[in-house]
Amino acid sequence: MKSRDTLIRLKRFQVDEKRRRVAQIEMMIAEFDRMAADLDREIAAEEQKAGITDPNHFAYPTYARAAAQRRDNLRMSAQNLHAQLDDAKAELGEAFEELKRAESLEDRERTSERTLDPAISQIGQARAMRATA
């Protein structure tokens, strides 16, 4: 019984850990998206200030070019994080299923103990009566 309780606690911890990982990845993706949007606004402002929107133009602002590269890197990182998020969600689902299996085993064990307890006590009483007779 104790080992089963320990197993369930371990499984709950693993599920919580996987949930934290999913939440952390989601927050990182949101932060990268926010930073990319900020860079988009800065690039647009820089292009408007220079009056040049073609990145291939020789007088295109250097800051806008660097900001565009940074924005593209952030978007690629966010895409990579989406792949990691999918994996983390799959791991969370597996951990949750393992927890449910462990809990259902615990419930079955408790149910079987409840049905066996009256029978065991009746057997014990019958033996005690025979011993005194």
Image (cartoon, helix red, strand yellow):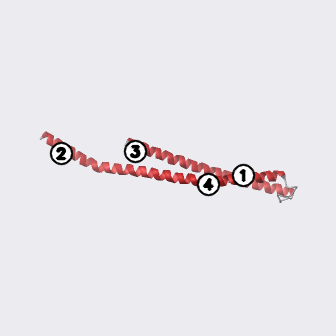
Give the structural element (helix, strand or loop) at label 1: helix
Place of residue 89 in the rendered image (x, y in percent of width and height, measured from the top left): 55, 53
Q: Quadrant of the N terminus?
A: top left
Circle 3: residue type: Arg
Q: Amino acid at mark 2?
A: Ala
Q: Which residue is mark 1?
A: 73
Badge 2 element: helix
- Work out whether residue 86 or residue 17 is closer to the camera in this orientation and state it: 86
Q: Position of residue 62 (x, y in %)?
A: 83, 51
Spatial separation of the CA atoms under disc 1 and disc 2: 79 Å
Q: CA distance from mark 4 to mark 1?
A: 16 Å
Is residue 94 toward the left or the right of residue 50 in the image?
A: left
Please give left or right for residue 85 compared with residue 12 in the image: right
For marks 2 and 3 on the same chain, the one whose residue lies earlier in the sequence: 3
User: Is the C-beta separation of discs 1 and 3 under 8 Å?
Assistant: no
Q: Are marks 2 and 3 in contact (CB under 8 Å)?
A: no
Q: Nearer the N terminus, badge 4 or badge 2?
A: 4
Mark found first going from the N terminus, 4 or 1: 1
Residue at left offset 54%, top offset 49%: 19
Circle nearer the N terminus (4, 3): 3
Q: Is residue 115 left or right of residue 9?
A: left
| Residue at 47% over, 53% down | 97
Q: Which mark is drawn over residue 83?
A: 4
| Residue 4 image label | 3
Q: CA distance from mark 2 to mark 3?
A: 32 Å
